[in-house]
Image (cartoon, rainbow, N blue to C red):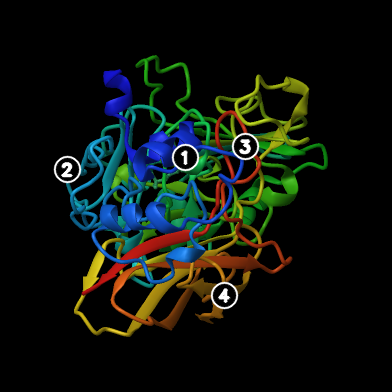
Amino acid sequence: MTNKIERSFEELYKDDPERADAVVLGRKPGPDRRGFLEGAGLAALGGLVGSTIPFGQNIPSGFIPAALAQDKGAAPAPAPAPAPAAAPPAPKGPVMLDFPGKDKGLVVIGDKPLVAETPEHLLNDDTTPNDKFFIRNNGLIPDETKEGDKWKIKIDGEVNKPIEISLGELKSKFKPITQRMVLECGGNGRSFYSPRASGNQWTNGGAGAAEWTGVRLADVLKMAGVKPSAIFSGHYAADPHLSGDTSRPAISRGVPIKKLMDPNNMIVWAMNGKPLPNIHGYPVRLVIPGWPGSVSNKWLTRIWLRDKPHDGQGMGGTSYRLAIKPMVPGDKPDMSNFRDLESMPVRSIITSPSNGTKLAAGTRSVNLRGASWAGDYTVRQVDVSVDYGMSWQRANLAPQKNPFDWQRWTGAVKLPSDGYHEVWVRATDSRGVMQPHVAPYWNPQGYGANPFHRVAVLVG
Ligand SMILES: Nc1nc2c(c(=O)[nH]1)N[C@H]1C(S)=C(S)[C@@H](COP(=O)(O)O)O[C@H]1N2
Ligand SMILES: [Mo]
């Protein structure tokens, strides 16, 4: 019983949307539950968000208003007007990050290992500053080395001449480059899956775009001489496994040779013009953009070229893997039905206004800002809607500074009246693949959830 009462709106809707409508909106469960809200249901929803809902007739049943969904780190939802007696209490607030050099607006989604995401409205800068960049660790955080330039990286395996090269040599022997590129956690968006998928419950904040300075990975690999027998890489780093067992890597993933040799992959030592912060891999890390962040090892010590796919920590099973044939959400996985997640899916976010923004009565136009990106692809189009997806309008899309950069977008929307509004955004990639309404292709560990992002705006 208590269990039920303590659940948030979101959990209630995820578990049983039909019952949730009945509890929250006094709506009778029935065969028409996929229909649109009307009458008493709509009035009750208006009561919950504390306002009238001008486009309310477009809201499908089973829909949780963005103002009520547990949107970590966003401004508090408007105070609900007297809610129906049966409504569950508001969800517990997010845990804010307290870490040296980090913005206190980041939200902790795991503490051992430390994982923190950047709420969408803190991704409003064209380039994500170091203090706002998300954190994802799989193991323990190593102590900061005193002599960064003496740090060594080994390249061995299927190469003509195994090498061990120091950071100092990397800086002097190769031409440094700087590129703004997106780094995104493979699990970004995981919290949007229903039923819940296992792992850190990211909303959209497991991503950022920094200016990375370093050398091209391919240049360094060529120095060792990649043999034709090299078909896959295995990446190793200095952070100990969570258990403290130093013989076990915290994470060791790899990519096929074609991706490995992409000229945009980098070994980097600076982030936004400053030495890499220790939490982001000081003194050197990989940045292999477009693919799950887990292949971009921090505290990099070794790249092993292999004549078979890598089998390190985080490879195989259902880790960073998608179902080949779509599976029934929540079903027991058939282990022969999985393939590695490669390119990350298309995603867009609204970075301004933030969710729960209140605007003065009479406001009829709202300026929007956001970001969009699409793994190995580019974003072709970004659309916004203020009528729950009944109509969409094109946003202005900025070009990339370089490959694998995100694309910032801007727009302005007109609102017909005061009241509770939602702004929705969706992006389409260069192949024509568009973000879906709900998280697609459920898989046990929750990769690839990229539904539309929406923010609540209250006028008057
Ligand atoms: N050595 C090491 N590298 C790592 C990880 C890790 O746990 N250890 N986590 C990976 C994962 S899963 C992601 S998403 C990114 C996150 O990088 P960030 O913490 O700098 O944002 O680092 C990757 N590199
Ligand atoms: Mo990740």
> Compared with residue 268, is residue 310 higher up or lower down, i.e. above or below?
above
Kindly identify which numbered label has been placed on residue 391: 4
Mark 4 belongs to which amino acid?
A: Ser
Q: Secondary structure at mark 1?
A: loop
Which label belongs to residue 390? none
- Which of the two marks, 1 or 2, is nearer to us in this view? 1
How far is mark 4 from mark 3, CA to CA?
Answer: 27 Å
Q: Earlier in the sequence, mark 1 or mark 3?
A: 1
Q: Can you tell which of label 4 and label 2 is closer to the viewer? A: 4
CB at mark 4 closer than 8 A to ligand 2? no
Q: Earlier in the sequence, mark 4 or mark 1?
A: 1
Circle 1 crowding by C-alpha within 10 Å: few under 14, some 14–19, many from 20: some
Dot placed on the residue nearer the N-terminal end, 1 or 2: 1
Ligand 1 shows up in the quarter that is top left
**Farthest right residue in view:** 228
Residue picked out by circle 3: 442
> Mark 2 sits on what residue?
98
User: Which mark is drawn over residue 28?
Assistant: 1
Residue 75 rendering spot, x and y as whole percentages = 22, 57
Determine whether label 4 and label 1 are within 8 Å by CB. no
Please give the name of the residue rendered at 52% of the width and 55% of the height, measured from the top-left corner.
Answer: 60
Q: CA distance from mark 1 to mark 3?
A: 29 Å
Task: Identify the residue at horizontal 31%, vertical 63% (top origin).
Answer: 121
Q: Indicate the amino acid at tag 3.
A: Trp
The local secondary structure at tag 4 comes to: loop
Q: Is 265 drawn above or below residue 228 in the view shown?
A: below
